[in-house]
Amino acid sequence: MIRVLLVDDQPLIRSGFRALLDIEDDIEVVAEAADGRAAVELAREHLPDIALVDIQMPVVDGIEATRRIAADPALAGVHVVILTNYGLDEYVFHALRAGAAGFLVKDIQPEDFLHAVRVAARGDALLAPSITRKLINRYVTQPLRTGTEAGLEELTNREREAVALLARGLSNDQIADRMVISPMTAKTHINRAMTKLHARDRAQLVVLAYESGLVAPGDS
């Protein structure tokens, strides 16, 4: 059962998402919140698998709520998915830096929304290759975090190669084809890199790859 926390200051939005989720046999909405502070408290109380969090909310906004959830070791299993009206914008990238596993636009089709919840519950990032490229090319123009390169030294050459390909928007299957390995081995390389770099998920690994200079915007 996938446990979901809904966080949005608009009751109509929450009720709409809840109506979609409640009819699914494998998904359960465990709580709702109207602001980021309540979201963090409910996340600690219910330990959901997914927190669907709006960016712009009163009291504590979605970015700060994401940061607090990501910083709490007790909430390591909570995957934050940002909800936005605006698509790819500056707030989305700040949310990814804060620890979000991905983002969804609120006008998403119902079937795509349900699929996205299940993808996030598996621990996969909600960043399609095209979105990854747009996000990186638009917002990551120079390394912003110091000390990351030292962490990359812990990676093997093959792990570094896999992370670089992931950051360029390739899927596991595409990484496997490029490296001439199996998709399972590609996934293993990515998972080991996440562990070594203390990345919560694949989205964070993408951010770290660009911040560290492992790859640069425009790399092909």
Image: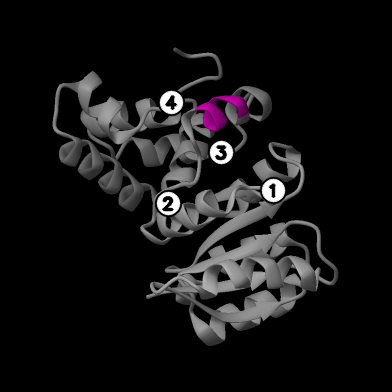
Residue under the point 70% across and 40% down: 87
| Span colored in magenta | 130-134
Of badges 2 and 3, the one in the foreground is: 2
Residue under the point 69% across and 48% down: 107
Query: Is residue 144 positioned above or below 125 on the image?
Result: above
Q: Amino acid at mark 3?
A: Thr
Which numbered disc flags the more N-terminal residue, 2 or 4?
A: 2
C-alpha separation, residue under disc 2 versus residue under disc 1 = 25 Å
x and y percentages locating residue 29 in the rendered image: 54, 77
- Residue under label 2, please give it: 201
Of badges 1 and 4, the one in the foreground is: 1
Numbered badge on residue 107:
1
C-alpha separation, residue under disc 2 versus residue under disc 4 = 17 Å
Discs 3, 1 touching: Cβ within 8 Å: no
Tell me the quarter of the picture where residue 41 sits.
bottom right
For the residue carrying disc 2, how many other residues have a C-alpha within 10 Å: few (<14), some (14-19), or many (20+)?
A: many
Which numbered disc flags the more N-terminal residue, 1 or 4?
A: 1
Which numbered disc flags the more N-terminal residue, 3 or 1?
A: 1
x and y percentages locating residue 3 in the rendered image: 46, 75
